[in-house]
Image: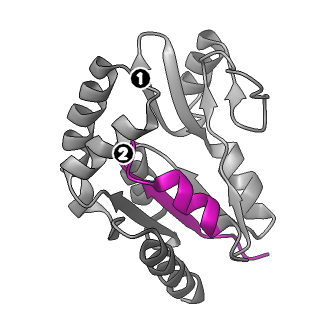
Amino acid sequence: MNSGKLIIFSAPSGAGKSTLIQHVLQQGFNLEFSISATSRQPRGKETHGKEYYFLSADEFRDKIAHDEFLEFEEVYHGCFYGTLKCEVERIRETGKNVIFDVDVVGGLNIKKQYGDDALSIFIAPPSMEVLEQRLRGRATDSQEKIAERIGKAEYEMTFAPRFDKIIINDNLKKAQSEVEQLIRDFLSK
């Protein structure tokens, strides 16, 4: 059986990555979303194996020690996020293509490991000003949190040139069709 290909999405918070991923998943590209593992507690109605694989910090460290992650990050002390190798292989073995929503460093690590079998896409905001307006428009974060996200976004933007493609999300319909075309071309290779 032919192993599926990998499509990696990375972006600063507020660039519209999740919206674009949801759109792409509905386009019949035979995609399955790679569920990340985390050591944080479930929020709201989140369930194990749907939004995330919820692990204790000790279980997470054990899997790191046994080289079970493609990529992982300790976001803050004891709070880990990562992509399990077995999750990616499970999807690929069914012949489906894998779609990822990961931070920039994780995205580049996955690309490095899979080479031409992976397409890395960086979703960029039209400007930092627009990004700030979007984050403020969400009205979910404090001023400090917004400032922190903007600082992180400026840092993440420095990684954009290392991705296969950069899509500037200034017009959602245009970004959707650009992403669709990119994926169509990549999967037909």
Q: Write down the residue under mark 1.
A: 75
Q: Which of 175 and 78 is in front in this view?
A: 175
The magenta span reads: 1-24
Q: How crowded is mark 2: few (under 14 residues within 10 Å), some or many (20 or more)?
A: some
Across and down, in percent, residue 61 comes to 56, 17
Q: Mark 2 points at which residue?
A: 134
Q: Is 106 left or right of 101, judged from the image as shown? A: left
Q: Position of residue 189 (x, y in %)?
A: 54, 89
Q: Distance between the residues labelled 1 and 2?
A: 23 Å
Answer with left or right where residue 88 lies relative to residue 177: right
174 above or below 112? below
Query: Quick check: is 7 in the magenta stretch?
Result: yes
* Residue 132 in the image, given as x and y percentages of width and height: 27, 41
Q: Please indicate whether residue 127 sits to the left or right of residue 62 in the image.
A: left
As drawn, is 155 to the left or to the right of 96?
Answer: left
Q: Which amino acid does label 1 sit on?
A: Val
Return the residue nearer the eye: 104 or 94.
104
| Residue shown at 47% from the left, 57% from the top | 9
Task: Identify the image quadrant of the N terminus.
Answer: bottom right
Residue at 70% across / 44% down in the picture?
86
Image height check: is 119 above or below 13?
below
Mark 1 vs 2, N-terminal side: 1
Disc assigned to residue 2: none
SS state under label 1: strand
103 within the magenta span: no
Q: Is mark 2 on a helix, strand or loop?
A: helix
Amino acid type shown at disc 2: Arg
* 117 is higher (above) or lower (below) than 123: below
The image shows residue 44, relative to residue 135, as above or below, that is: above
- Quadrant in the rendering for residue 148: top left
